[in-house]
Image (tube, grey):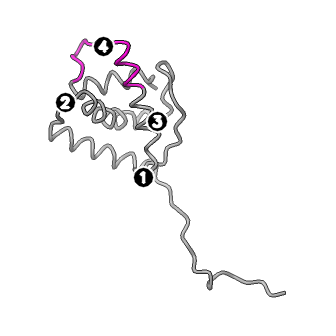
Amino acid sequence: MATATDIINRAGKRATVLADEGTFTASEAVDALQIMNDMMHGFGPMGIYYAHATLSATDTVNMPDEQLRNLVLMLSKELAIEFGLGIDPGLALEIENARAQLQAAYWMQRPGITDPMLLPRRFV
């Protein structure tokens, strides 16, 4: 279990926005939290059907521990874009794999559309 701040700091270090012992300033942390919430609210169109409630900095991220690394990688991409940093090709591959793993973990079968002529009818 990790808090939103834990995820943000891990992602910042992964994206090389933060040094090993560095931390975000207060305004950067607020921006990073907003970026994380926006990203998680936008998971649905990416095929990640995760029900997200907006987090504050000290809230626990309601995601299984085995998926936290994938969340960190996805957020590292967003933070790198926000801070104007390039993404290493190796990291880009890891981020795409993380997205695929989150899609697989939160996959949901949509109901099929049935031809109206195949539906059972009730005669009166």
> Hey, which quadrant is residue 39 in on the image?
top left
The residues bearing labels 4 and 2 have C-alpha atoms spaced at a distance of 17 Å
Mark 2 and mark 1 residues within 8 Å of each other at the beta carbon: no
| Residue at figure coordinates x 50%, y 55% from the top left | 108
> Hey, which quadrant is residue 25 in on the image?
top left
Counting residues from the start of the chain, the first of labels 4 and 1 encountered is 4
**Regarding mark 2 in the picture, which secondary structure is present there?**
loop
Compared across the picture, whether 122 is left or right of 101 comes to right
User: Disc 2 residue type?
Assistant: Leu
**Regarding mark 4 in the picture, which secondary structure is present there?**
loop
User: Disc 1 residue type?
Assistant: Gly
- Between tags 3 and 1, which lies in front? 1
Where is residue 96? Give x, y as percent.
27, 46
Residue under numbered circle 3: 64
Mark 3 and mark 2 residues within 8 Å of each other at the beta carbon: no
Part of the protein shown in magenta: 17-33
User: Disc 3 residue type?
Assistant: Pro
Counting residues from the start of the chain, the first of labels 4 and 2 encountered is 4
Counting residues from the start of the chain, the first of labels 3 and 2 encountered is 3
Residue under numbered circle 2: 85
Q: Residues within 10 Å of mark 4 (few under 14, many from 20)?
A: some
Q: Residues within 10 Å of mark 1 (few under 14, many from 20)?
A: some
Residue under numbered circle 1: 47
Query: Is residue 115 within the magenta segment?
Result: no
Compared across the picture, whether 91 is left or right of 111 comes to left
> Hey, which quadrant is residue 117 in on the image?
bottom right
The residues bearing labels 4 and 1 have C-alpha atoms spaced at a distance of 32 Å
The residues bearing labels 4 and 3 have C-alpha atoms spaced at a distance of 25 Å
Front residue of 9/35: it is 35
